[in-house]
Image (cartoon, rainbow, N blue to C red):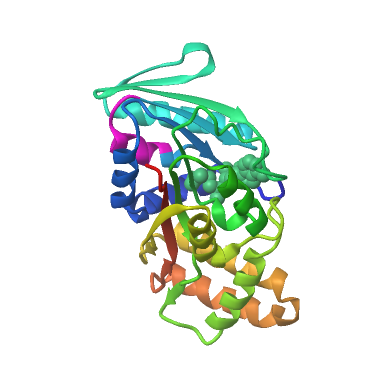
Amino acid sequence: MSEGFSADWLRRREPFDALARAPHLAERLSAALPQRPRLLELGAGAGSLFRWLAPRIGRAQAWTMLDADETLLAYGFERTAEWAERQGWKVTAPSGALLVHAPGGAWRIEARVADFGDSPDDLPLEGHDAVVCSALMDLVSPAWSRRLAARLAVPFLACLTVDGRDRFIPGHPDDALIRRGFARHMRSDKGFGPAMGQAAPAMLARILAEEGFSVATAASDWLVPRVATALLAEMVEGHAGAAADALPASASRISAWRTARLEAVAAGRLSLVIGHRDLLALPDKE
Ligand SMILES: C[S@@+](CC[C@H](N)C(=O)[O-])C[C@H]1O[C@@H](n2cnc3c(N)ncnc32)[C@H](O)[C@@H]1O
């Protein structure tokens, strides 16, 4: 795995992720699943997708979460246990798993450390009724996606894949430069081969349709308001850092953009839209 994702970053983005994901695609997924579905989550991180999707499925369910980062998975168990207890639900931990005793039935989570960057060929797809992920598919390569799609025989929900429709508000003359550098950086290898980056939503939809899936997509943009100064500052730093890596010849313009944008964040004058799409692919035979 070449990219590290901090627990703080995943925690800060969780409320924006939750507001952005497309609930109607989750409902369609839930309707396509058996009575007690078994879900495989790829790149689960700290479990943000579980806390959003499990209540929408509602009934008894079992999740297998895979991630290369053991610390994030452990932190995710803690967060999920605290979150469930805040809802008034009992939580137990039978033999390494986490069991949330929700009103509609028990939700069982098992977490496994796995680096699946080289290939999706060893993913334990068998024995699962759906494969799900969030904020992952822009990191993977077209070849990796094609191999996954060729193996998939169950519904696939991919949430929050970036699509490049980013907009800092108000605009700045060098926004286009930053966007170009950021987009180029997103296509670099994140441990899965050259990443699809912002082309991922369209590429993924095509790849899955070619494998015979019915594909539906929906916008799931982040709307980051002026008051969310910590996340905005992090996004400015992230965009400037990525653009500087990708366009070293423009370092001084990028640095000036960074300074101006951080000043605007501190003054409560900047807001941000980050374009994402959610995708649901259902096997036609369903
Ligand atoms: C952007 S984070 C998203 C995490 C989580 N799905 C969420 O939405 O909060 C990407 C996740 O993919 C995991 N990841 C990245 N490369 C990986 C690899 N090669 N194998 C397994 N997991 C990987 C990271 O550890 C991280 O948890």
Instruction: Kindly indicate the quadrant of the structure image that contains residue 251.
Output: bottom right
State left or right for residue 18 relative to residue 128. Answer: left
Relative to 204, does residue 281 appear above or below in the rendering?
A: above
Tell me residue 99's x, y (percent): 41, 19
Tell me residue 177's x, y (percent): 60, 81
**Residue at horizontal 45 percent and vertical 21 percent from the top:** 98
Tell me residue 73's x, y (percent): 55, 32
**Residue at horizontal 38 percent and vertical 37 percent from the top:** 51
Q: Is 8 contained in the magenta span?
A: no
Q: Nearer the viewer, residue 66 or 257?
A: 66
Tell me residue 160's x, y (percent): 45, 55
Q: Nearer the viewer, residue 158 or 45?
A: 158
Relative to 191, does residue 234 appear above or below in the rendering?
A: below
Whether residue 6 can be seen here = no
Q: Please name the predominant secondary structure of the magenta segment in the image.
A: helix
Span highlighted in magenta in the image: 50-60
The residue sitting at the bottom extreme is 173
State left or right for residue 271 relative to residue 143. Answer: left
The residue sitting at the left extreme is 103
